[in-house]
Image (tube, rainbow, N blue to C red):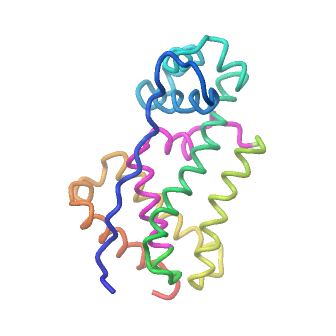
Amino acid sequence: MSNDPPRLRTPSPLPVPARPYHHGDLRAALLVAAEQELAERGMEGFSLRSVAKRAGVSHAAPAHHFGDVQGLLTALAAEGFREFLAAQAAREAVAEADPASQIVAAGLGYVDFAIARPALFRLLWQSERPDFSDADLGQAARAAYQHLVDQVMATGGRSTADEAAAWAISHGLADLLAAGRLKSMGSLPVAARDAMISGIIRRILPDA
């Protein structure tokens, strides 16, 4: 079987909702608009009013669905963790089935997500604005971490240190690449970048 990295399209941010909004899932449209607003204006320029304007709905619509800014960001973070797991699943689906290949694929999905959606990535891991005591967000965040734990255990890991090492490598690479800090790696063709990331992750696996 070929060892070439799988050819995948990097996951893209959700499309900007059509304006004005007339029908369909208003809550989902507001989450799309919130992610786009966060990506373009940052936390400083983020408001319910600006999200409503981007979605083409009344100023009262976001408050009706989410209550306040924290409520909206909490819901966006919960959806973000689910999208994060989906990015990993896309890589895992085309990787070899053995545990080492699966955890490497998850790491590549981690990087895919961070590069494609850096604002959402920062909201999940670097912001204190979402309310992690919220049941939906808490469940989504725990599912993401449990996926990591399950993969580490499958490769022979037995300790918190093994989990921390796998998380630190994948998260660190994703964060640095999304921020444009690893210029030498970030400038590589995707296949070469993926091969380098795969090699780094494999170094820290318990049975490596």
Judge left or right: residue 132 versus residue 94. right
Q: Residue 83 in the image: x percent, y percent?
A: 55, 50
Residue 150 among those drawn in magenta: no
Quadrant position of the C terminus in the picture: bottom left
Residue at 60% of width from left, 33% of height from top?
A: 28
Q: Residue 117 in the image: x percent, y percent?
A: 43, 43
Quadrant position of the N terminus in the picture: bottom left
Q: Residue 168 in the image: x percent, y percent?
A: 50, 63
The range drawn in magenta is 103-132
Classify residue 47 by image quadrant: top right
Q: In this rendering, is residue 200 above or below 67?
A: below
Q: In this rendering, is residue 131 above or below 162?
A: above
Q: Residue at the top extreme? A: 59
Classify residue 104 by image quadrant: bottom left
Q: How many marks?
A: 0
Dominant secondary structure (helix, strand or loop) of the stretch shown in magenta: helix
Classify residue 144 by image quadrant: bottom right
Q: Residue at the front extreme? A: 23
Residue 112 among those drawn in magenta: yes
Judge left or right: residue 206 versus residue 180. right
Q: Residue 200 in the image: x percent, y percent?
A: 37, 73
Residue at 64% of width from left, 43% of height from top?
A: 78
Residue at 50% of width from left, 73% of height from top?
A: 103
